[in-house]
C-alpha cells in the first residue's frame, strides 16, 4: 500500500506540474524502479521535462519488466504509446507510427479510418 501511495503522489505532482517535487520523489524512491507503474510516471515526468531519450530508456526497461513479470497488456500498450510520443518528439515519425499502430486494435483502426503501410512488429524499432 505504501508503494501505491508513493506512485499516486508522484502522479498527482506531475498532474499539478510540480516537477521539482516529483523529481525528488523519484530520486528518494529508487527502490521502486522495478515497478512498471512507477516507471510509467517517471517516464511521463521525463517527457514533460523534454528529456525524451531518458524517458525512452525508462520505457525500454519497462518493456523488460513487463516481459519478466508477465504484466497485462494494459501496461504494454501504455508503454508503447509513451515511447511513440517520445519518438515523435524527437522527430522519428516512422518509429512513432509503428508504436502507435501497436496501441490500436483492428476495430479501432477501422473506426478511426487508419491504415499503416508497415508490419506490426515492434522489435526492430525498440532497440
Image (spheres, rainbow, N blue to C red):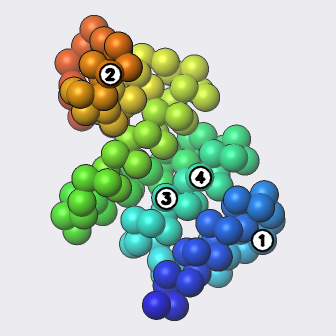
State the residue at coordinates (40%, 65%): 36
User: To which residue does mark 2 refer?
Assistant: 111
User: To which residue does mark 4 refer?
Assistant: 44
* Of the two numbered discs 4 and 2 in the rendering, the one whose residue sits closer to the viewer: 2
Quadrant (top left, top right, bottom left, bottom right) of the C terminus: top left
Neighbour class for label 1 at 10 Å: few (<14), some, many (≥20)?
some
Spatial distance from mark 3 to mark 2, Cα to Cα?
Answer: 28 Å
Q: Quadrant of residue 28?
A: bottom right
Q: Mark 1 touching mark 3, by CB under 8 A?
A: no
Q: Picture coordinates of residue 74 (x, y %)?
A: 32, 54
Spatial distance from mark 1 to mark 4, Cα to Cα?
Answer: 14 Å
Reading the chain from its start, which is encountered first: label 4 or label 2?
A: 4
Q: Quadrant of residue 5?
A: bottom right
Neighbour class for label 4 at 10 Å: few (<14), some, many (≥20)?
many
User: To which residue does mark 3 refer?
Assistant: 40
Q: Picture coordinates of residue 125 (x, y %)?
A: 33, 29
Spatial distance from mark 4 to mark 2, Cα to Cα?
Answer: 28 Å
- As drawn, which residue projects farthest toward the front? 111
Amino acid at each position: 500500500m505504501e508503494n501505491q501511495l508513493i506512485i499516486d503522489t508522484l502522479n498527482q505532482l506531475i498532474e499539478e506540474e510540480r516537477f521539482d517535487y516529483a523529481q525528488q520523489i523519484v530520486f528518494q524512491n529508487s527502490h521502486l524502479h522495478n515497478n512498471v507503474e512507477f516507471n510509467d510516471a517517471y517516464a511521463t515526468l521525463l517527457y514533460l521535462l523534454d528529456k525524451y531519450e531518458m524517458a525512452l530508456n525508462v520505457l525500454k526497461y519497462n518493456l523488460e519488466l513487463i516481459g519478466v513479470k508477465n504484466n497485462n497488456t494494459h501496461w504494454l500498450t501504455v508503454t508503447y504509446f509513451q515511447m511513440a510520443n517520445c519518438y515523435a518528439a524527437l522527430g522519428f515519425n516512422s518509429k512513432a507510427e509503428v508504436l502507435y499502430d501497436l496501441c490500436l486494435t483492428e476495430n479501432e483502426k477501422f473506426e478511426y479510418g487508419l491504415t499503416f503501410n508497415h508490419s506490426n512488429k515492434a522489435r526492430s524499432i525498440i532497440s
